[in-house]
Image (cartoon, rainbow, N blue to C red):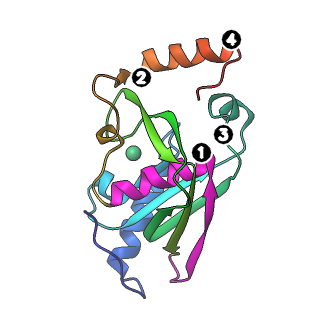
Amino acid sequence: MGQPFTFPLSAEDLAIIKTLEAKYDSEENCSGLAAPQIGFSKQAIVFALDADEELKKWRPDISDTMPKTIWLNPHYEPVGDDKHIDYEACFSVGDSAGPVARYKTIRYQAYLVDGTKVDGVAHGFLARIIQHEIDHVHGILYTSYVPEGQLLPLDEYRRMRKEAMEKGQSSS
Ligand SMILES: [Zn+2]
């Protein structure tokens, strides 16, 4: 469970955020990263979502996008009860992927590094990324939502997904 930040941020806090961002930047295929994943028990996340054509093939529910964003003390709540099941993987879980039901629409609140409060609504795959990353801040891994026996090796998941795409099917 990460600790919340207080503003203005201390030099130590800023150093943690800088380390988190650098680690995120150095990872390939990483949609997001949270401070507890790299050993800091603090409520910070970094993530981005581009409207990348290749990614859209894998994630047909991309609607909203977001440039690289760092949020502190982030929080989300569902808007409605609708959920969408899709596969997730995680830097902290190694070479696995599994299906997770996430809210399709969420309302979020967070603080930027300069202390500005932000809030808004996110849909689709962006909402999924935000839920996944904010859960990390609370010590929750996606694997806790994966039904018993449905966690797959990452390469098996990729093969399955590629086959489904080639048949022109959506994952939902
Ligand atoms: Zn993760």
> Is the C-beta separation of discs 1 and 3 under 8 Å?
yes
Q: Amino acid at mark 3?
A: Asp
Was residue 128 drawn as part of the magenta stretch in this picture? yes
Reading the chain from its start, which is encountered first: label 3 or label 2?
3
Is residue 20 or residue 108 the one in the foreground? 108
Q: Any mark on residue 5, and which?
A: none
Identify the residue shown where x is 51% and y is 34%: 86
Quadrant assignment, res 55:
top right
- The percent position of residue 130, horizontal first and vertical second, equals 50, 55
The relative height of residue 113 versus residue 35 in the rendered view (above or below) is: below
Report crowding for label 3: few under 14, some 14 to 19, many 20 or more residues within 10 A (C-alpha).
some
Report crowding for label 4: few under 14, some 14 to 19, many 20 or more residues within 10 A (C-alpha).
few
Reading the chain from its start, which is encountered first: label 4 or label 1?
1
Find the magenta span and give its range: 113-137
Reading the chain from its start, which is encountered first: label 2 or label 1?
1
Residue named by callout 4: 167
Is residue 57 or residue 79 the one in the foreground? 79
Q: Amino acid at mark 2?
A: Leu
Q: Amino acid at mark 1?
A: Phe
> Is the C-beta separation of discs 2 and 4 under 8 Å?
no
> Between marks 2 and 1, how big is the CA–CA gap?
19 Å
**Element type at mark 2:** helix
Residue named by callout 2: 154
Reading the chain from its start, which is encountered first: label 4 or label 3?
3
Reading the chain from its start, which is encountered first: label 1 or label 3?
3
Q: Any mark on residue 125, and which?
A: 1
